[in-house]
Image (cartoon, rainbow, N blue to C red):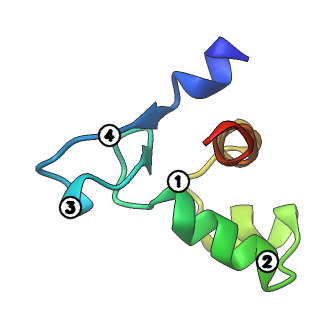
């Protein structure tokens, strides 16, 4: 689990300090939003080619513990 959480970054100078994935400008909230809208993992990975499957897993773990 710590490997997944290591994918999350929080930088006050990026996206107003919101939790992001691997320093990218895509936030945990962005990924959760598309998941809650019903998008599949495959669709998300196709629409956001810079994301990896483990990034989605990390987002879900991060959300569950915060």
Q: Disc 4 or 1, which lies upstream in sequence?
A: 4
Q: Disc 3 or 4, which lies upstream in sequence?
A: 4
Residue carrying label 2: 36
Residue at 85%, 64% in the rendered image: 42
Q: Badge 4: few (under 14), some or many (20 or more) residues near its Cα, within 10 Å?
A: some
Q: Badge 1: few (under 14), some or many (20 or more) residues near its Cα, within 10 Å?
A: few
Q: CA distance from mark 1 to mark 3?
A: 21 Å
Residue at 59%, 51% in the rendered image: 51
Where is residue 14, by image quadrant? bottom left
Residue carrying label 4: 10
Q: Residue 45's x, y, as percent?
A: 71, 61
Given residues 48 and 14, the one toward you in this image is 14
Q: Badge 2: few (under 14), some or many (20 or more) residues near its Cα, within 10 Å?
A: few
Q: Residue furthest top?
A: 2
Q: CA distance from mark 4 to mark 2?
A: 22 Å
Q: Nearer the viewer, mark 1 or mark 3?
A: 3
Q: Secondary structure at mark 1?
A: loop
Given residues 9 and 55, the one toward you in this image is 9
Given residues 2 and 26, the one toward you in this image is 2
Q: Residue 57's x, y, as percent?
A: 77, 41
Q: CA distance from mark 3 to mark 2?
A: 23 Å
Residue at 68%, 36% in the rendered image: 65
Q: Disc 4 or 2, which lies upstream in sequence?
A: 4
Residue carrying label 3: 16
Q: CA distance from mark 3 to mark 4?
A: 9 Å
Q: How many marks?
A: 4
Q: CA distance from mark 4 to mark 1?
A: 18 Å
């Amino acid at each position: 689990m710590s490997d997944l959480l290591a994918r999350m970054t929080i930088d006050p100078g990026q996206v107003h300090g919101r939790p992001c994935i691997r320093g990218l400008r895509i936030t945990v909230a962005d990924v959760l939003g598309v998941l809650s809208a019903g998008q599949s993992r495959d669709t998300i990975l196709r629409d956001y080619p810079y994301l990896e499957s483990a990034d989605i897993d990390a987002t879900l773990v991060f959300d569950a513990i915060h």
